Amino acid sequence: MTTVTKLQPGPVIDETVRLLVEHYVFPETAGQLADLLRRRHAEGAYAVDDAEELARLVTADLQSVNGDRHLSLQYHADRVPEKQGAAVLESIRGDFDTSLGGVPRVASLDGGIALLELAPMLFPLEWAAEPLSAALALTSRAQALIVDLRANRGGDPDTVAFVCSHLLDKRTHLNSMYWRDGERTEQSWSQPHVPGARFGGSKPVYVLTSNHTFSAAEELAYDLQQLGRAVIVGERTRGGAHPRDGWTVHPHLEASIPIGRAINPVSGTNWEGTGVQPDIACAPADALDRALTLARARLAG
């Protein structure tokens, strides 16, 4: 049930500015944005009485300096839990329950080729390990695998590592995250052992992408591409590489602020702003057919 709460833009802007300066992974940019939000508020740009409209206005300003798509003021129709990070988890639980745990489609195609669709998200591993394990074990016997990320909007880096672990033969450095909190770097590695059968690191893998593919889904595609483990087929992805956290600043508003940045061990950079560039560029609607053609030719050869 939607709860209407009177909006006072001033406290929302003040708290968003405080969180931005304290947590955003790029301190210099945070200072610029803080000044921008204060100035815009003083000019009356946020003098609205609708939380959804305020979220739109503030988000446009937050993304105006460096185009960071993880940086936003998010509107939630239902009341936002006060616990840090809880708003997103609550909002995506329904998606998890209605998408078979984030694996809405597993199919056996002709010629020993399997299709694994991961959507709408790579859900937190504590939720998704069981359905993912079942799906990955089921496709492990295939001669080639097509992973469809065209409708995947992101998720959990631990889940990325879990999926990659099934597609590699040995423990492999996948990615690193630089966290502003403590100014530390944390490495992400594939797991040396997986539950159930492993597809392995030698059979061909194709990953389908679109302009809707975002965040952790981009990391999955990028990690596999940089390792030379998969061929990316489809459209350039959206370009969001900064892990974020969320803070409640109003009963219906959450400040989403990136607290780290990805550093790939092969490229030394990430996909922020540029997206993951496909190896085979085509319209998303044509990506599955193109990948099938490539897989059949590879297996025939």
Image (cartoon, rainbow, N blue to C red):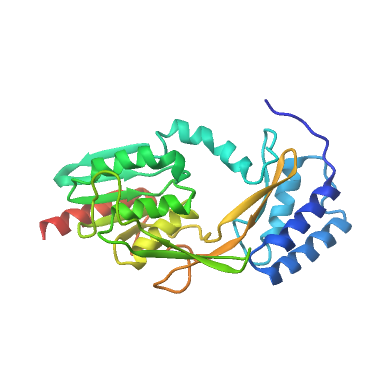
Quadrant position of the N terminus in the picture: top right
Front one among 249 and 3: 249
Quadrant position of the C terminus in the picture: bottom left
Q: Which residue lies at the image location 37% right of the left edge and 38% below the top edge?
A: 130
| Position of 12 relative to 251 (above/below) | below
Q: Is residue 264 left or right of residue 5?
A: left
| Position of 206 relative to 185 (above/below) | above
Residue furthest to the left? 300
Q: Which residue lies at the image location 83% right of the left edge and 36% below the top edge?
A: 6
Residue 161's spot in the image, x, y percent?
A: 39, 55
Q: How many marks?
A: 0
Q: Which residue lies at the image location 59% right of the left edge and 57% below the top edge?
A: 69
Front one among 242 and 115: 242
Q: Is residue 53 left or right of residue 189?
A: right
One can see residue 277 in this view: no
| Position of 239 relative to 113 (above/below) | below
Residue furthest to the top? 1
One can see residue 170 in this view: yes
Q: Is residue 5 left or right of residue 101?
A: right
Residue 252's spot in the image, x, y percent?
A: 72, 39
Residue 105's spot in the image, x, y percent?
A: 33, 38
